[in-house]
Amino acid sequence: MIKENLDKINASLANGVRLIAVSKTKPVEDLQEAYDAGQRLFGENKALEMRDKHAVLPEDIEWHFIGHLQTNKIKYIAAYVRMIHSIDSLYLLQAVDKEARKHDRVIDCLLQFHIATEETKFGLNMEEAEALLQSPEYAAMKNVRIVGVMGMATNTDNRDLVRREYHTLHEYRDFLAEKYFKGHDEFKEISMGMTHDYDIAMEEGSTLVRIGSAIFGARDYGTPVNDV
């Protein structure tokens, strides 16, 4: 079923949109099945869970960290993570830069914006994002590269609200690209859209969709993970 699900989703993707298979809580056997079906981008939201899976799965997997990242857990993923979607503070970005330097790597990062009506979601507002980008601390960083933005829409059946939130995130990306990243073609990513709303996200310009349950089935909340 995983291969069939992937084939169906890939056939629905707009041109230029990449699929991140959200594999959090799923066993390595499911990830291997997806890999065997051709999937290479996987998204995890627990650093230790990602570490454990990375250790036993094929080396050419492109790992994306999509959850709230604690600074003391960065060391477990810094050697191999391809992209961190959830940069929501200058402090966190500094910590990523420090760990990436230890491995002589540059880690691609996305600025996470709070676009939802729900207060429980993480993310920057535009004032905070601009303060980060204008800071001397950011200017001194050599081992991180900001390549776009990420956001999570409100968990609602109101598709008009979701569309407005995704449209806002696209506008944020365009504003930052013009003001801070002119001439930097790598600043292009918009990570938005999940199983239930990725069609709207693609219509609003998403370049990375994060899909889990439509590939692997419902999330297993009973799976133990090492992160606390």
Image (cartoon, rainbow, N blue to C red):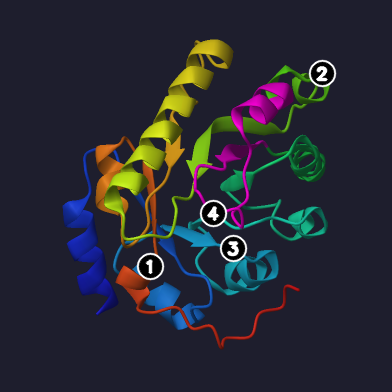
Vertical side of 202 occupied by 215: above or below = below
Residue closer to the observer: 13 or 196 = 196
Local secondary structure at mark 2: helix
State yes or no: discs 1 and 3 in contact (Cβ < 8 Å).
no
In screen coordinates, is 1 left or right of 188?
left
As shown in the figure, which amino acid type bears the numbered disc 1? Tyr
Picture disc at residue 45: 3
Q: Nearer the viewer, mark 1 or mark 4?
A: 4
Please state the extent of the stretch shown in magenta in the rendering: 106-132
Q: Earlier in the sequence, mark 4 or mark 3?
A: 3
Q: Earlier in the sequence, mark 1 or mark 4?
A: 1
In screen coordinates, is 48 left or right of 7?
right
- Disc 4 from disc 3: Cα separation: 19 Å
State yes or no: discs 2 and 1 in contact (Cβ < 8 Å).
no
Quadrant where the C terminus sits is bottom right
- Residue 222 position, x and y percent, is 56, 88
What crowding class fits label 1: few (fewer than 14 Cα within 10 Å), some (14-19), or many (20 or more)? Answer: many
Question: Which residue is labeled 1 in the image?
Answer: 35
Q: Earlier in the sequence, mark 3 or mark 2?
A: 3
